[in-house]
Amino acid sequence: MCKKTGSKMDNSVVAAAVYSHGKKVTDISLEDGVSWLGKPGHFAWIGLKDPQPHVLTTLQAQYNLHELAIEDALLRHTRPKLETFGDALFMVLYSPIFENGELEFVETQLFAGTGYVISARYGQSAPYSSVRQRCEARPLLLEHGEDFVLYALLSFVTENYRPIMDSYNSTLEETEQAVLKDALTMADAVKIQGLRRDLLRLRRNIGPLVEICQELQRLDFPFIDKQMRPYFRDVAIHVNRLLEDLTALREMADHAIEIGLLVESARQSVTQRKFAAWAAILAFPTAIAGIYGMNFHNMPELSWQYGYFGVLGLIGSGCIGLYASFKYNGWL
């Protein structure tokens, strides 16, 4: 943890430390950071949680952050992006979380330049303490400095999408099984449409990460070593895999609706066949009764002693025959 200075701005500081040659030198407060800036072989890594505007303006004065970057940081964004300001960069990333059962995206802002990396995390996304621990456990890579920290943070945000997508994959598989067993209900259709909407929102926040990784591979910044470019390319590969999986999930959602409609159509077809079969069976005695209900005088069967029983037998045998035929053909 950073040093306690009694300053209000320290309430938003999760961790702040100076690193050199892959090892942590010391924890610092925000007021101490400027004294390390420009010291050869050293860089400050500051992690903030829901910082107030005055904290960002203080950091702007200490690390000479571009005024447009600070102005941009005070706004709420809609998509991830990367902007460059001279030899510094400003990046906006989004991490997915489930809040009250709903998919939400929380913003992370990254400032990076020679001698510093500043992360500002908003909302209840996963903390970056594990990223710092992993980096400190790999001194040979942390020795690269600011660019490795930037890679680690970007990789961590990308990893946060995988559990969310696995959850949606399980939900879609369960939904497919459900619509195969029972009729597609309005609740099922609303649920599937909600899943499709969430998948589109995921794509909207994952897609720009490919371009960001490509930009980081091309940028010629003093604090980005060419040897780190394969690491950013590795993140781009993972992002492309996420996009491919998103496409597959989208197809699963579409197929779930199609399967539900096909199964429902098949069920309706079976029901219609049953109605048609029973209608045909009932039509036979109706036709016989209609013939003998015409009340013509010249009807020989009317004077037959066993005519009534003969007609009943004909109706019974006809109905039984029709029922057996429909049953054999799978209509009943």
Image: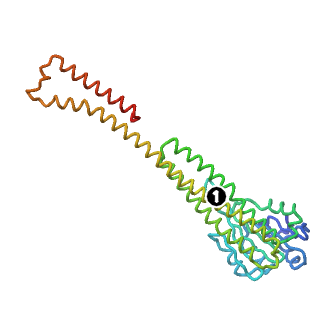
Is 68 placed left or right of 198 in the picture?
Answer: right
Residue 108 vertical position relative to residue 331 in the rendered view, above or below: below
* Residue 235, image quadrant: bottom right
* Residue 100, image quadrant: bottom right
Check the picture and name the quadrant holding the C terminus: top left
Residue at 67%, 64% (x, y): give it: 240
Residue 250 vertical position relative to residue 229 in the rendered view, above or below: above
Residue 300 vertical position relative to residue 129 in the rendered view, above or below: above
Colouring mode (rainbow / by chain / secondary structure / one colour): rainbow
- The crowding category of the residue bearing disc 1, from other C-alpha atoms within 10 Å (few below 14, some 14 to 19, many at least 20), is some
Is 19 placed left or right of 95 in the picture?
Answer: right
In percent of width and height, residue 19 lies at 88, 69
In percent of width and height, residue 47 lies at 79, 67
In percent of width and height, residue 34 lies at 85, 77
Is 19 placed left or right of 88 in the picture?
Answer: right
Secondary structure type for disc 1: helix
Q: Which residue is mark 1?
A: 245
In the image, 323 versus 129, the foreground residue is 323
Residue at 14%, 19% (x, y): give it: 304
Q: How many marks?
A: 1
Is 316 placed left or right of 26 in the picture?
Answer: left
Single out the residue that lies furthest toward the bottom.
86
- Amino acid carrying label 1: it is Asp
Single out the residue that lies furthest toward the left.
297
* Residue 139, image quadrant: bottom right
In the image, 235 versus 326, the foreground residue is 326
Check the picture and name the quadrant holding the N terminus: bottom right
In percent of width and height, residue 255 lies at 53, 52
